[in-house]
Image (spheres, rainbow, N blue to C red):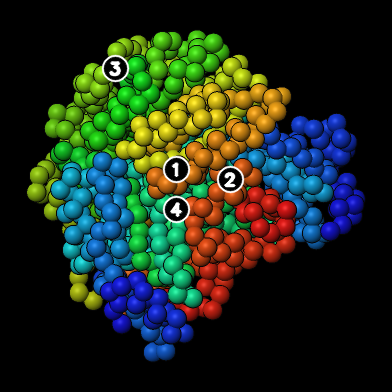
Amino acid sequence: MRPTEISELQEIVRTHSRLSISGGKTKTALHNIGDDVKNIDLSGIEGMVEYNPNEFTFTARAGTDLGQLARMLGDHEQYLPFDPPFVEQGATIGGTVASGVSGPGRFRYGGIRDFIIGIAYVDGQGNIVHSGGKVVKNAAGFDLSKLVVGSLGRYGAIVECSFKVFPKPEVLKTLRVGFPTLDEALDSLISITRMPMDLYALDIIPHSDKYFLLMRMGGVEEILLDRIYRLQRVTGDGEVIEGEADAKTWREIANFKWLQAGEILVKIPVTPKRVFELDRVLSGASAKCNYSVGCNVAWVAWRKPIDELDLKLNKLGLSGLVLLGEVDKIHIGLKKGNQFSKKVKEALDPENRWVEV
Amino acid sequence: MEVDKLLDDLAELYPNDRLLTQKAALITYESDALTSYQRSPRAVVIAETQEEVIDTVCKCHKYEVPFVARGSGTALSGGSLPVEDGIVIALNRLNRIISIDPEQRIAVVEAGVVNSDVTQAADPFGLYYAPDPSSQLICTIGGNLAFNSGGAHCLKYGMTSNHVIGLRVVLPDGEVVELGGDSLESVEPDLVGVFSGSEGLFGIALEATLRLLPKPESYKTILAAYRSLEAAGEAVAMVVESGLLPGAVEIMDNLAIEAAEAAVQAGYPLDCEGLLIVELDGELSTVEFDFKILLEIIERSGAYEIKIAKDNFDRQRIWKGRKSAFSAVGRLSPDYIVQDGVVPRGRLSEALSEIKRLSKKYNLRVANVFHAGDGNLHPLILFNGRDEGALESAEVMASEILDLCIQYNGSITGEHGIGMEKRDHLPKMFDVNSMNTMKLLHEKIDPLMISNRGKVFLTGVS
């Protein structure tokens, strides 16, 4: 079912007992649902509702294509600094909120949770619920707009979301330095994160026997040259990537172009201190991996049965979410549910209409 | 409700000097910074450990006695007003900084840690905690979290909830849960995000994992004086539209300047109607570059006097004036109401003109101090509580300002919360379905409504 009006969606909700939601269906693993569940495709509820470039805020319908959004913001030299992933695959803004995914640009100013300022969603009774607002600062009422980030549709169907945006930097450049070991790359990363330096993205990418540290920065040309020089004094010379090559590098990272057919993509929140032990386990299983956002998230390409990774993550005390691939479970490793999350679900969806994938 | 039985139990848990029941000892806790609301609790317990807080909540739940958690009592919306026949759980002594991890740039602190103490502890590592409410020298992290406090630097850095990544919480039924964690990323709904700003209705945060940032290498702070408040407001719109991202953009009006000057001699021009403070922070080269652009905008915006902070001492002096403005206004008037609303930044000038009109209508002086870069207004309505009807007039005027914020599609609170003060405005900002959803969530998490009873919502037990 693909409603194009919110009223149509409300009617569907009122007349079905088990529901799931999809947007651009770019995170394939999230759509493996039972036969008794009716899927609602929200890609028809789309379009910009309100964009005031002078306010640096916009409100868009949930099914709005991220690429289209980026172009509209780009026309005014603005952007969503958290680099929403899966843009090229056709991800929607609502799906990005619900799956709670941010790209490498999250490093500087924060992730999707830090830029969302308001939502409207249709609850299990078919009512429209608002939270937050359209201004950049707001402390009125419970912040359900943050709650839905990463909720995977378990509370309702997001129909509109409001965001704050930032001015786009004039120029972007990346310094890429290869290290023979992860230890050395991590040492450099930790030194850099304590420097008073505005880095847009900071990733470690293992590739052909090396660990590459990628430092992305933005601003005006002359400032970036100074910044690169300062970074090089810590990391060594490396290679400076500029212009279209820089854009392509990060597009490929945010759109997971490094993934090969048949590989399962897993998101694993981690910390710089725990990356080493995770990497040992992943290397042992010959899995490819990107450590993104200053090593706060590992994006893993897994080829073996998912149960194996589930077991390994459990041993490490880490959690994972499968985003791409055909698997029978998407939540792997340590399960974090507690009384609070249970009560939130019961309160917001008392009839349990929205499936928890 | 069995308060006496609870007090008997608490007497076993706390020594005499940390279980206050005498009227005289309770006076301190009768109100927070919104002093027009006062209420005496039945008792106050001064907790020193997380276990004591958990035990206390469990006992309150057992006897169905309401409790109010309180830090330094700097809340401006009556959010930590005690409940009659309830108890106050004072958290100031729950103030251990459990760890500072410079490699991961996080701090784990207990709820009663004072905001500026986090920055002080992080300072040797070249790090700091970004949220900086004006009361940061005294307010606590637990209170900041409960009200999702802001401060002068939200424009660039966001509010408290943007800097909290993990929590250890005791729910109203005594169960202890961990929300979030120590990574910036997560694979679950943002439970930390919804707990932030829940004003104590979801239980008590015992400890928080906070993000730390590298201290900015350089600052440039500029003061610009305008002949009218509206002109200062228009300058803000110009700065925001330019694409610059200043750390802070603040405005003070003549009355606020007068008060701040008398209190701390910040070096503000006394004859100006609207004073704009803009601060750039970050890398030296970026700040220097952006400053040239900023200066050009300020010169174009009609400022008749421009001052640039010469050194850190000068900068601190400017901020001391700004941050002491609320309390300094006490010199001008025996009583005042601090209001906290948000309008879209492009409508600042309009909102200021309206506030001026309301000031004339009610014949009440208003001092304006606000976070202009966020559109966050803080009109301080001055009155003398001894004059008959003065408080009522001030409250009606404050209420009209909030109505204005709603009409402009803004918010009734940017950082002070709903508390007691704005309970009747929340349903004006949110429709029935949205209000009901929030109430359902509240009732599910706290069916007995013992955690900070009577705040945020008008209905329910009070």
Which residue does the image show at 84% across and 38% down from the upper left? B20
Q: Which residue appears farthest toward the bottom when viewing the image?
A: A35
Residue B365 spot, x, y in % from top left: 54, 23
Q: Are marks 3 and 2 in contact (CB under 8 Å)?
A: no
**Which numbered mark, 1 or 4, is in the foreground of this view?**
1
- Looking at the image, residue B106 sits to the left or right of residue B285; the answer is right
Instruction: Look at mark 1 in the image and give the residue it sits on.
Output: B405
Instruction: Look at mark 4 in the image and give the residue it sits on.
Output: A132
Q: Spatial distance from mark 4 to mark 3, Cα to Cα?
A: 35 Å
Give the camera-side residue of B334 and B63. Answer: B334
Q: Are marks 2 and 4 in contact (CB under 8 Å)?
A: no
**Which numbered mark, 2 or 4, is in the foreground of this view?**
2
- Looking at the image, residue A277 sits to the left or right of residue B397; the answer is left
Instruction: Look at mark 2 in the image and give the residue it sits on.
Output: B422
Which residue does the image show at 13% across and 44% down from the upper left? A241
Residue A164 spot, x, y in % from top left: 33, 47
Same subunit, tags 1 and 3: yes
Give, as a three-letter code, the residue at label 1.
Answer: Cys
Which residue does the image show at 23% across and 60% down from the upper left? A66
Give the camera-side residue of A140 and B432. Answer: B432
Can residue B5 be seen in this snapshot?
yes
Q: Spatial distance from mark 2 to mark 4, Cα to Cα?
A: 16 Å
User: Secondary structure under badge 1?
Assistant: helix
Which chain's residue wears label 2? B
Can residue A177 be seen in this snapshot?
no
Q: Residues within 10 Å of mark 4 (few under 14, many from 20)?
A: many
**Which numbered mark, 1 or 3, is in the foreground of this view?**
1
Give, as a three-letter code, the residue at label 2.
Answer: Lys
Question: Closer to the N terminus: mark 2 or mark 1?
Answer: 1
Which chain's residue wears label 3? B
